[in-house]
Image (tube, rainbow, N blue to C red):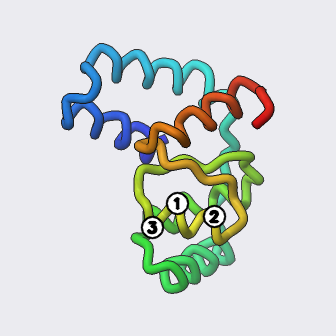
Amino acid sequence: MAEAIAAIDKKVAKRQISEEERDFVISVLFSDVLIRVTFIKISDEFIEAVLERILAYHLSADDALQLFSCSVALSPIFLAADKSLIRAAKEEGLKAFDVEITDESEILRRLLAGEDD
């Protein structure tokens, strides 16, 4: 959620969307998406796996945590606004989408709507 909100807020900073549009999208995230989120308990093994991803993909701790959490939760999609994180997620076998790329945003919209590719 933090990564998604940061990406949405970045659009406001770049003046690509208004604060009202940002607030609407965030409210949709909390009302619709959040009910589908799986929370994962962090264990020693979990931390070890995150550290492995930091070293394997040269990610920040936050990005590695997000990547591994998505894998553990068996999430059908992975969203980010960071090209190296998207690349790492794809290497991990996840359906990863860069929310800042229009074409991928359309693919994502179809996935969330349950439409076929």
Q: CA distance from mark 2 to mark 1?
A: 6 Å
**Left or right: 110 as drawn, with respect to 114:** left
Q: Which residue is mark 1?
A: 86
Name the residue rendered at 41%, 16% in the picture. 24
Discs 2, 1 touching: Cβ within 8 Å? yes
Q: Position of residue 98 (x, y in %)?
A: 49, 49
- Secondary element under disc 2, as helix, strand or loop, is helix
Real-space Cα separation, disc 3 to disc 2, in angstroms: 10 Å
> For the residue carrying disc 3, how many other residues have a C-alpha within 10 Å: few (<14), some (14-19), or many (20+)?
some
| Residues at discs 1 and 3 in contact (Cβ within 8 Å) | yes
Which quarter of the picture shows residue 35? top right
Residue type at tag 2: Lys
Q: Identify which amino acid the numbered label 1 is placed on.
A: Ile
The C terminus: image quadrant: top right
The residue that label 2 is drawn on is 90
| Spatial separation of the CA atoms under disc 1 and disc 3 | 5 Å
Q: Sort mark 2 into few (<14), some (14-19) or many (20+) by Cα contacts within 10 Å.
A: some
